[in-house]
Image: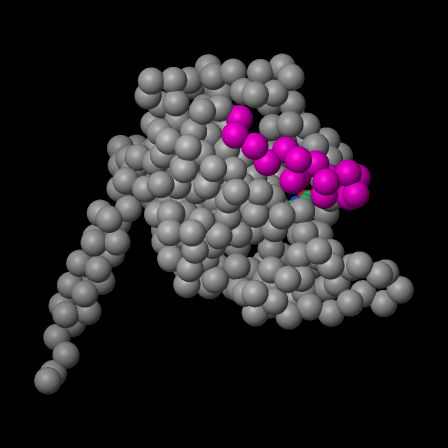
Amino acid sequence: MALSENVISRAIIESYSAKLLSHLEVDVAMVGGGPSALTAARILAKRGKKVAVFERHLAPGGGVWGGGMLFNNVVVQDDVLDILDEIGVGHKPVDNAPGYNTVDSVELASGLIFSAIKAGAVVFNSMAVEDVVFKDGRVSGLVLNWGPVQKLGMFVDPLMVTAKCVLDGTGHPCEVINLATRKAQIKLDTPTGGILGEKPMWADSGEVSTVENTREYFPGLFASGMSANNVMGGYRMGPIFGGMIKSGVKAADLITKALESN
Ligand code: 48H
């Protein structure tokens, strides 16, 4: 049978529409496809939760791809090697630094993306979150637009999805929590009620605090990874990713608990 060009178009438009329509109402909507959110997405999807990840850029993976200053390797600690093994990502011990390993950053980024999707999470790339749905004192969804539309500053009205839980995995800028505190004037579960702000480099401390700071900061609104560290005033740690992966594991556990207690 000769292939008509419009068969290709119809196949893509119909299948994409079906995918989007079936994710207008989800258990968990994640903002940003960085390492912490992708880890959480994989675990939650494996537990049978309906998960959508919205990533502004064409390629999810966040800060992983660039390694350290574009040297495309990153460092991880021994205590996340079981997770890397589970998703099939290789690692090599660092000479004279017991407990630390290097990982190819392209392999890690692609492994995190692939394993989240294979577990059942759906990733919508080139889609930016520009606002939250805020109802009855709770964050209950996201307001979406195309990444390129946002980048070009075009005046195009958005579309919305609803979610039982929202995860801010936007990294350093903690964009969702920023806009929710500004626009909905919410008080966060922090000592000041606001965003404390990311501190400078202290790798050891940052790795621990990233996991500690992974929390529900407002009903329905969780933060992971560097976003959590910015909200709660944690130190940065450079291109070491054990804390990001463990933050994703903790976010998945907290969100599972929240979903199952309602
Ligand atoms: C849709 C958005 C939006 C939006 C942002 O920064 P990330 O890699 O996320 P984390 O926190 O899981 O990992 C942090 C890590 O990469 C890092 O930066 C480290 C370890 N830094 C240490 C240091 O010292 O600097 O990814 C966040 C993702 C990105 O892909 C963004 O494009 C995306 O979120 N994003 N997507 N709508 N409004 N804002």
Residue 226, located in which quarter of the rendered image?
top right
> Who's the residue at 53% across and 26% down the image?
217
Q: Confirm whether residue 133 shows in the render.
A: yes
> Who's the residue at 28% across and 46% down the image?
23
Range of magenta residues: 202-217
In the displayed structure image, the side of residue 74 where residue 95 appears, left or right: right
Seen in the picture, residue 260 relative to 218 is either above or below; the reply is below
Q: Confirm whether residue 107 shows in the render.
A: no
Residue 215 is a magenta residue: yes
Q: Nearer the viewer, residue 104 or 42?
A: 42
> Who's the residue at 21% across and 54% down the image?
18
In the displayed structure image, the side of residue 15 where residue 116 appears, left or right: right
Residue 211, located in which quarter of the rendered image?
top right
Residue 92, located in which quarter of the rendered image?
bottom right
Q: Please identify the dominant SS of the magenta region.
A: helix
Query: How far from the left and from the top, in percent, is residue 183?
Result: 43, 19
